[in-house]
Amino acid sequence: MWFARHVRRMRGVFRARHERIVEALSRDFAERLEVIPAAAGLHVSAYARGATTSEIKAVISRAEHDGVGLQSLSMFAIGPDTRPGILIGYGAIAIERIE
């Protein structure tokens, strides 16, 4: 019973985090990022508009330097023809820190 309550509560917490990240990306980075719609998971993925894989790596490096963990979508690709993009995990970040 306690586990079911925990799962319900966390579902709301994770939904709020997801929505906050999508809102921030859509507001602040709409010209550079195309958010990939998702209904499950603990991450938000976005394609980079007009960026190369090396530019994505540089953005990831800068973000890491500032304490923000990102991953390149190319890490999850099966073939060589993938669009450059990023993956933002939010399972362990407080909603207040997202902005």
Image (spheres, rainbow, N blue to C red):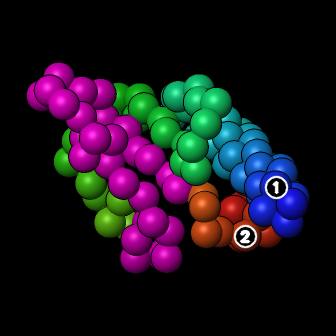
Numbered range of the magenta stretch: 63-89
Q: Circle 1 sits on which residue? A: 4
Q: Quadrant of the N terminus?
A: bottom right
Left or right side of 58 for 39: right
Residue at 82% x, 55% y is 4
Left or right side of 8 for 60: left
Mark 1 vs 2: CB contact within 8 A: no
N-term mark: 1 or 2: 1
Is residue 77 placed above or below 28 in the rendered structure?
Answer: above
Left or right side of 63 for 37: right
Q: Circle 2 sits on which residue? A: 94
Q: Amino acid at mark 1?
A: Ala
Per the image, is 88 magenta?
A: yes
Q: Amino acid at mark 2?
A: Ala
Residue at 60% x, 61% y is 91
Return the residue nearer the eye: 1 or 14. Answer: 1
Identify the element where label 1 is drawn.
helix
